[in-house]
Image: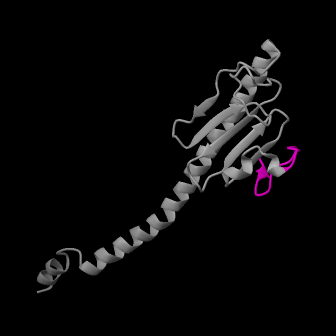
Amino acid sequence: MNKYYILRFNQGVTLIELMVVIVIVAILASIAIPSYQSYSRRATASAAKGEILKLAEQLERHKSKNFTYRGFTTTSVTLPRGGYTIEISDDTTTGNLLTNTAANGQTWVIKATTTDSRNFNFIAKNSGLRCQSLTAAAVDNDCGGTGTCNVCETNSENWQ
């Protein structure tokens, strides 16, 4: 009789045990997925910063050869993931692209705007100013309505 009891006990998994396993997996997934999404956003933002720094180096190399930034050909770059669009223009009120013959050619501004509202937008200038913000309007190079662009606008912060 003892043998019959052991065979009957090991016949399968009960519905309660299955539900407990599903709940545990759901809890682990609810913790892991947002963490992964946050990591992915940080990685994309870091790639955008790296691209901005690479373009800044190329701009300085171009100016050392040509004595002007005018004529620099890379004016818009989209990162492989499609998360950012990077634009390079003259740091003047007109904001001409550097390929435009009307460009000043003595200054530049690089703007990286994202399609993800939970990620940072970036701006960098040849003066050394680097700002980041969750809102694109805070890094739009209008100096916050003032004439001086030596500090980050309201709702934005410096990045290194």
Query: What's the residue at 69%, 22% (across, down)?
Result: 100
Query: What's the residue at 65%, 34% (across, down)?
Result: 87
Whether residue 154 is in magenta: the answer is yes
Query: What's the residue at 78%, 42% (across, down)?
Result: 130
Query: What's the residue at 76%, 30% (across, down)?
Result: 90
Which is more toward the observer, 30 or 109? 109
- Classify 54 as above or below 149: above
Residue 33 coordinates in the image, percent (x, y): 48, 60
In this picture, residue 127 sits left or right of residue 13: right
In this picture, residue 82 sits left or right of residue 70: left
Whether residue 135 is in magenta: the answer is no
- Asked whether the viewer can see residue 160, the reply is no
Q: In the rendered picture of this protein, how many numbered marks are placed on residues?
A: 0
Q: Is most of the magenta stretch helix, strand or loop? A: loop
The image quarter in which residue 68 lies? top right
Magenta stretch? 146-160
Residue 12 coordinates in the image, percent (x, y): 20, 74
The image quarter in which residue 58 lies? top right
Residue 39 coordinates in the image, percent (x, y): 58, 52
Quarter of the N terminus within the rendering: bottom left
In this picture, residue 83 sits left or right of residue 27: right
Extreme top residue here?
65
Extreme bottom residue here?
1
- Asked whether the viewer can see residue 32, the reply is yes
- Classify 47 as above or below 19: above
- Classify 82 as above or below 106: below
Quarter of the C terminus within the rendering: top right
